[in-house]
Image (cartoon, coloured by chain):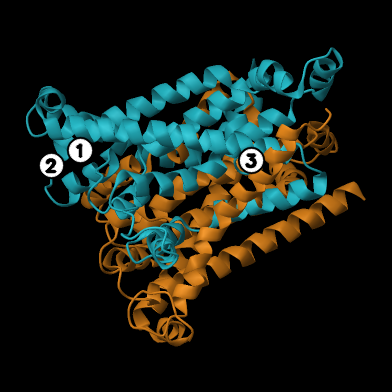
Amino acid sequence: MSTLRNKLKPGWLLVLPFLALVVLFYLGPILNILMLSVTDPAPGLANYAKLGESDALARIMWTTVRICIVTTFFSVLLGYSIAYGMVHSSTQKQSLMLTLLLVSFWISILVRTFSWLMLLGNRGLINNTLLGLGIVSQPIEFMRNELGVLIGMIHYMIPYAVLPLLVNMQSLDMRVMNASRNLGASGTQTFWRIYLPLTRPGIVASSLLIFILSLGFYVTPAILGGGKVLMIAEYISVQLLVTLKWGTAAMLAALMLFGVLALLWLMSKFMKLSTVFGGSTQ
Amino acid sequence: MRTSVFASINRVWAWLLLLFLVLPALVAIPVSLTPKRFLSMPKGDFSLRHFEKLFNSADWLSSFAQSAIIAISTALLASVLGTLCAIGLWRVSSKYSEVVRAFLLLPLIIPQIISAMALYRLWIPMGLLDSYSGLILAHTILATPMVLITVSASLANFDPKLEQASKGLGASTWTTIRRVILPSVKPGIFAGALFAFILSWDEIVVTLFISKFTVYTLPRRMWNGIRENTDPTVAAAAVVLIGITIILFSISAIAARRRAQTTSG
């Protein structure tokens, strides 16, 4: 017992500084926010009752969930395609593909959002080109609507979708696919019946990851939505910085937090979380 | 597996998608070269006036400097805290340590808007709003999990027998950490420090809440410029940021390649 204690002690001492920092300066204020949701402006569940009463709140929640679902679907679909293309390329091409993926991962979100603004605006590059070629007579409204928000968000999320899928696909035993082909199945059959089911853990993990990241997304909806597409994160910031309603904001933050934690729990059922997070930083 | 038509079509499609990921950001380059006073695509003639303006603007330069100070401090603090924490959790390696690890990764996955709200709420009574220490502390909390991940990944490849050998030869715990463990997780620490730097350098959501006038970081100035949507100096700043990203990326890629060569040969 004493040797065990000697072994444990120095380890925990090293963990302590960051653990204390997180507990005091992060967990503490987050619990404070959760408290606020049931105490501000008056104790009780009045803030939560607003969900049923206010049409605006219901609309914002629905907009957020809808955008998250569409973003998740397309990010994972396109991400799957990239990951599949990568594992089926030569090592050299694969490293070039990984470079492109990581460069896009690294470019500042503000730079990317700015670029979309330049591309999608009424006088943006895309509309100018389409008008110049005579394909359309009126500029297409890409921005200040959900389409713009979705384009910006999917573009941002695709790299996050690729990484868990890539980890999953690289771990597959290709002999299974060869066996299927040798037994007479076509390539398409092998893909649908063998390959796709084997990559289900990757699909689930990357879907949940994208959904979690999209739920609290702020920058892209705020800029590309141009005030027309209000998602929860932007609504929270308005409540705090403009109308100073901490109670409503805290209630929304609490719902978002519980949503995220529930999804994380679900995700841990399908994949070791450390693989996802470890994979996303390699 | 024999290559099917489907797989070859998908390969082309995958390349197109990858280009779609990278190319849109490059539109900032022509926009930054416009000779006009407002945001526009240049038609025929180019000018460097907006870069000139960027590098002569006291506001933009101070934002660059402030962001650099905050990001470097964050990277240093996060690497120390994250490395200690990763080594500690690795040494403990029990059921509890895995729970603590999952808990400590939360700042990375909890939506930034919630972190922003919580930190804003706490920073008001602590008087940390709109100060360097407030921003550095906030960014350190958000960035340290990055270092925890990268150093833990390095430790996973570390042979525990080396630690036992060091102990067996009479080295103290501290000496073992300093002379045996730290050198072998150096790549993880560097990678983590770089990620921490980028996280802080690029952080906008928390920054929007906890800074105001005194501290005005680069993302904050970009954010304002983008919202006003008139001044092409933003485009010039975006191009400089893309340049910095590519330089940092190349450095880390070269370092990774050199490491791979030394370990394999």
Foreground residue, A12 or A135?
A: A135
Horizontal relation, residue A266 to residue A147: left or right: right
Horizontal relation, residue A222 to residue B174: left or right: left
Of labels 1 and 3, the one closer to you: 3
Chain letter, cyan in picture: A
Foreground residue, A156 or B180?
A: A156
Quadrant where the image shows the N terminus of chain A: top right
**Callout 1: 10 Å neighbours few (<14), some, many (20+)?**
many
Foreground residue, A12 or A232?
A: A232
Find numbered disc 1 in the image and state the secondary structure of the residue it sits on.
Answer: helix
Chain B drawn in what color?
orange
- Name the residue that disc number 2 marks: A245
Chain at numbered mark 3: A
**Callout 2: 10 Å neighbours few (<14), some, many (20+)?**
some
- Name the residue that disc number 1 marks: A249
Q: Residue B86, can we see it?
A: no
Q: Which mark is residue A193?
A: none
Residue ID at (53%, 42%): A158
Q: Amino acid at mark 3?
A: Ile
Q: Amino acid at mark 2?
A: Lys
Q: CA distance from mark 3 to mark 2?
A: 44 Å
Mark 3 vs mark 2: tell me if same chain: yes
Q: Is residue A56 above or below residue B196?
A: above
Q: Position of residue B65 (x, y in %)?
A: 44, 73
Q: Which is more N-terminal, label 3 or label 1? A: 3
Q: Residue B230, can we see it?
A: yes
Q: Is residue B104 above or below residue A98?
A: above
Chain at numbered mark 2: A
Q: Which mark is residue A82?
A: 3
